[in-house]
Amino acid sequence: NAYGIWLNRVTDNTTIGGTLITDGNVIADNTSYGIFLANSSNIQIINNTISDNGDDGVSISGEGSALGSVNNSIIENSIFNNTKLGINLRAGADPLEYGITHNDPDDSDTTADPDRDGPNNLQNYPILIKADYIDPNLSIFGKFRSEPNKHYRLDFYSNTETDTNGFGEGETHIGTVNASTDSSGVFDFSLDSNNIDFSIAGLTHEYFAATATECVAFGCASLLSTSEFGLSTNVDNIV
């Protein structure tokens, strides 16, 4: 198949996968995208395996809320070994712009210029600064910068390798942290075995990446838009 799943102008709270691991789909070995959302909103993609596709694992297009490409959450999937990005928020009409969407300081790239609205509001991703492994514990340090005084869900993944562009995918989900940004839009984090479970993956997974999903309110019972995967970091110290 060219696409594993293709949704066009769907806005009816569709779920691809489900809350149980057994609800998930295997979306693999397609010549193009694993999942392609075109001008669609309120889609939840959860507990699927999305791998070995000829383009992005998950690709979302559509210029922001006017055409409906917002509030698509992508959590707890196994996304790996796709030819291009694990998650691609495709901003702009030029195919050359379909690559990595880099963070902006206060995540205002869609609100400051309506002509630059992008899918999932071009949500910023977390930055992982360092990862240490001291048997049997893993620690991950990083910073998340987005809109001030808002609530987010940060999801962390381990990988056996990273993409050649230095950005990660999400082979194994190892933990989730709820984050509330301060008045400057910043949330610093230091994670350990209380937040992440490295035993799920094991020592062959030396690379880590994360996504951020905006939440409706504190506690993140209801989710909005998920970011792309951020820059990958590898284990800096193994003892």
Image: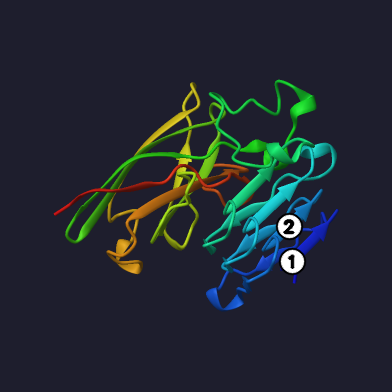
Between the residue at mark 2 and the residue at mark 1, the CA separation in whole angstroms equals 6 Å
> Crowding at label 1, few (<14), some or many (≥20) Cα neighbours within 10 Å?
some
Task: Kindly indicate whether the residue at mark 1 contacts the one at mark 2 (C-beta within 8 angstroms).
Answer: yes
Rendered location of residue 197, percent (x, y): 33, 61
Q: SS at mark 1?
A: strand
Scheme of image coloration: rainbow
Neighbours of disc 2 within 10 Å: few (<14), some (14-19), many (20+): many
Residue 109 falls left or right of residue 176:
right
Quadrant containing the C terminus in the rendered view: bottom left
> From this viewpoint, which residue is outermost toward the left?
239
Mark number, residue 71? none
Taking the spot 84% from the left edge, 56% from the top edge, the residue there is 8
Disc 1 marks a residue whose amino acid type is: Ile
x, y percentage for residue 189?
A: 36, 39
Q: Quadrant of residue 205?
A: bottom left
The answer to which of marks 2 and 1 sits earlier in the sequence is: 1
**Residue under label 2:** 36
Which amino acid does the dot numbered 2 rest on? Phe
**Residue 5: mark:** 1
- Of 176 and 61, nearer the camera is 61
